[in-house]
Image: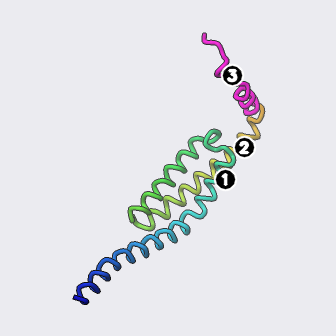
Amino acid sequence: MACKNTFFKWGSFAPLMLLTVAALAQNELRETFFKNADAALAAADATNARLLSPKNYQDGMKDYEAAENGLERGRNIEYVRSKAAAATAHLEDAAKTAALAKTVLSQSIKSRQDAANARATELSREV
């Protein structure tokens, strides 16, 4: 009877340990592959790249999500690494473009913000 209990304990404990080890390994891989992509995403968000460089931002997010999904599904590590690198490149380009656009379009951005602050869309008359 004691042998059955011991087998049952180890039989249910071992899969949990394997899942925990796999999750830790996946977290380490994510930190390694996504370190630069996360920094590039933060920089792109800080410069409002979603609005000022939508194509680069969208391409970067598409690659970022593909890399995350690939990592979660256990795809080839090289695939995850290449998608994360592509996401980094697109998001860095988006941040650079957005920074330039902010400089060039500063007056237009200010006017747009003034209109938003004045609730122009809510108060405008229907034509």
Q: How far across and how far down the image is residue 113, in percent?
A: 72, 31
What span is in magenta?
108-127
Residue at numbered disc 1: 43
- Magenta residues: mostly which secondary structure? helix
Residue 99 at what x, y percent from top left? 72, 45
Tell me which residue sits at (49%, 58%) in the image.
Answer: 83
Rendered position, 7 above or below 16: below
Circle nearer the N terminus (3, 2): 2
Residue holding disc 3: 120
Whether pointer 1 and pointer 3 mark residues with C-beta atoms closer than 8 Å, the reply is: no
Look at the numbered disc 3 and give the secondary structure of its residue.
Answer: helix
Considering every residue shown, the one lying at the far front of the view is 1
- Dot 2 or dot 1: first in sequence order is 1
**103 relative to 81 in the view: left or right:** right
Q: Position of residue 91 (x, y in %)?
A: 60, 52
Q: Nearer the viewer, mark 2 or mark 1?
A: 1
Using the numbered discs, state the Cα–Cα distance from disc 2 to disc 1 in whole angstroms: 14 Å
Residue at x 47%, y 73% (from the top left corner): 25
Q: Residue at x 43, y 76 (%)?
A: 21
How many circles with numbers are drawn on the protein? 3
Q: Earlier in the sequence, mark 1 or mark 3?
A: 1
> Label 3 vs label 2: CA separation?
27 Å
Residue corresponding to mark 2: 100
Locate the N terminus by quadrant: bottom left
Q: Report the disc number at residue 30.
A: none
Amino acid type indicated by mark 2: Leu
Residue 124: in magenta span: yes
Nearer mark to the viewer, of 1 and 3: 3
Mark 2, secondary structure of its residue: helix
Please say whether residue 113 is one of the residues in the magenta stretch.
Answer: yes
Q: Name which quarter of the figure residue 49 lies in.
A: top right
